[in-house]
């Protein structure tokens, strides 16, 4: 039986980040990564399957909510922004040490903009700006209701727009576009330089069982149809939508009651280079009533495989698959006695969401382009094609009040002894991968992470480690300026 210290299930950005952190903290660790596909970053981390924004709360309006009393709750936006700064610190460190290539291979500067129309939405955005701009994390955010300024910020969005329409926008110039697929490939390439790291592609985990000394994990070769058992001291389930079924197989009590609500998505992708060249920002709007957060509409400039691209969407749709290359039986096979009540109560309480997803699935190309024209009035149907945007599995948790609750976020579920952890959920996902994996390390490697050796190394890799960026303005400014310079993000792209 092969023995490893760490088994990473899934070759996405989360597993790659955790593996890279652990190898830098202790180069002697024996680490194995298992991926069911024949390639790394083939599911949620792939450029077209991931939001690709580098979520920082700058433009995503769903990260701020109005409270019942009318005040603006910005706590989530602040937390996500601070968490993204942690990711930027780690990537900066890896670039400086030569473990990641020239930054433009995976991250590029791009303006993050929010755009709304109508009196009520303008009032919302104005209030959101006032609440965020007062905090040092968002002190560089700009706001305008002036059409002339907006034509400079987002010429494509303002072209052909009714001059009498009430509009407003915010802008942050040091936003980013991240190709998380490319980043994942670079991280794993760096890890492969360690002789004690093994990558097993086209292998699936078919079973796992806790023994007194380790987890015994059954791994099947998808091509040779042969299986073997690996003994692992620690197991991380970072398989995107595939993490929930594996968590259920583990049998840990902490995973009891969890379910998943799968949502698929699609992009409109512009095939007209002249139109692509006219838009150089990420413009996010407000999600329609009843839409899941992953469906916040945005006109999105991307850099994919080094080339500019322009996407609009995503358009959500109902599905029963947990993975893009999964089975239509995924949802049904995830139903267990401990999560059936939460799943049914969420289905009962979210009928509007279900109807919305069905309506989205029945849209025609003409309907989707009509939605695009809210952002780009002069859009032509022939300039855009439809492509899959991957799968998301939103968390369903059991609760005492109503039986179940649908969660829109990212969550770590760990066993009480710290020998297994699973990553569930979706947005902000990859953008906060470093913060999320630090949480895994502090939970599952607690004794070592509290030791001086690991603390010193973590402080070297992430200078803000142990401090609060949202409470220390001077620390935030020093770290942000360094990150922007190291990653080549200090050039104004707007």
Image (cartoon, rainbow, N blue to C red):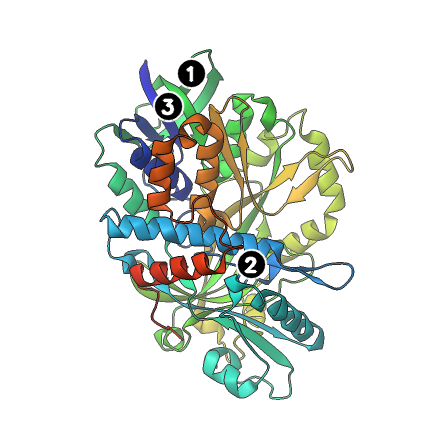
| Residue topped by disc 3 | 220
The CA distance from mark 1 to mark 2 is 43 Å
Judge the density around disc 3: few (<14), some (14-19), many (≥20) Cα neighbours within 10 Å: many
**Residue in front for this viewpoint, 490 or 330:** 490
Element marked by disc 3: strand
Task: Where is residue 33? Give x, y as percent.
Answer: 34, 31
- As helix, strand or loop, the secondary structure at mark 1 comes to loop
Look at 24% across and 57% down and name the residue there: 102
Tell me which residue sits at (29%, 57%) in the image. Answer: 103
Mark 3–mark 2 distance (CA, rounded to whole Å): 35 Å
Query: Which quadrant: the C terminus?
Result: bottom left
Q: Is residue 101 among the parts visible in the rendering?
A: yes
Residue at (35%, 58%) from the top-left corner? 483
Of labels 1 and 2, earlier in sequence is 1
Q: Position of residue 168 (x, y in %)?
A: 60, 77
Q: Nearer the viewer, residue 305 or 62?
A: 62
Q: Name the residue under label 2.
A: 315
Q: Mark 1 points at which residue?
A: 214
């Amino acid at each position: 039986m092969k023995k490893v210290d760490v088994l990473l299930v899934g070759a996405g950005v989360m597993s790659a980040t955790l593996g890279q952190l652990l190898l830098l903290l202790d180069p002697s660790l024996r680490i194995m990564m298992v991926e069911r596909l024949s390639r790394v970053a083939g599911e949620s981390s792939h450029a077209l399957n991931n939001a690709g924004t580098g979520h920082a709360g700058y433009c995503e309006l769903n990260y701020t909510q109005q409270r019942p009393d009318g005040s603006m709750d910005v706590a989530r936006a602040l937390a996500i922004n601070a968490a993204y700064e942690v990711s930027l610190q780690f990537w900066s460190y890896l670039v400086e040490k030569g473990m990641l290539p020239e930054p433009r291979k995976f991250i590029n500067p791009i303006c993050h903009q929010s755009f709304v129309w109508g009196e009520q939405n303008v009032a919302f955005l104005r209030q959101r700006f006032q609440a965020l701009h007062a905090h040092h994390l968002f002190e560089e955010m700009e706001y305008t209701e002036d059409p002339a300024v907006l034509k400079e910020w987002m010429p494509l969005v303002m072209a052909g727009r009714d001059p009498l329409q009430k509009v407003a926008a915010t802008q942050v110039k040091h936003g980013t576009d991240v190709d998380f697929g490319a980043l994942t490939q670079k991280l794993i390439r760096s890890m492969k330089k360690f002789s004690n790291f093994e990558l097993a592609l086209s292998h699936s985990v078919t079973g796992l069982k806790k023994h007194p000394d380790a987890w015994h994990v059954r791994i099947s070769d998808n091509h040779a149809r042969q299986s073997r058992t690996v003994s692992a001291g620690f197991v991380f389930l970072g398989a995107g939508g595939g993490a929930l079924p594996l968590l259920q197989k583990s049998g840990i009590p902490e995973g009891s009651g969890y379910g998943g609500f799968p949502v698929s998505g699609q992009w409109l992708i512009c095939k007209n280079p002249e139109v692509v060249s006219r838009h150089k920002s990420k413009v996010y709007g407000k999600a329609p009533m009843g839409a899941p957060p992953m469906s916040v509409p945005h006109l999105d400039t991307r850099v994919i495989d080094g080339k500019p691209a322009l996407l609009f969407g995503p358009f959500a749709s109902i599905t029963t698959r947990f993975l893009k290359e999964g089975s239509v039986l995924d949802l049904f096979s995830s139903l267990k006695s401990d999560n059936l009540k939460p799943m049914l109560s969420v289905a009962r309480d979210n009928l509007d969401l279900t109807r919305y997803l069905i309506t989205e699935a029945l849209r025609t190309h003409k309907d989707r382009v009509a939605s695009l024209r809210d952002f780009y009035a002069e859009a032509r149907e022939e300039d855009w094609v439809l492509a899959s945007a991957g799968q998301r599995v939103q968390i369903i948790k059991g609760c005492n009040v109503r039986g179940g609750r649908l969660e829109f976020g990212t969550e770590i579920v760990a066993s009480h002894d710290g020998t297994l952890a699973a990553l569930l959920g979706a947005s902000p996902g990859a953008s906060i991968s470093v913060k999320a994996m630090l949480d895994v390390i502090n939970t599952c490697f607690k004794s070592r992470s509290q030791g001086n050796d690991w603390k010193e190394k973590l402080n070297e890799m992430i200078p803000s480690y142990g401090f609060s960026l949202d409470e220390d303005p001077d620390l935030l400014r020093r770290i942000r300026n360094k990150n922007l310079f190291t990653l080549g993000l200090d050039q104004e792209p707007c």
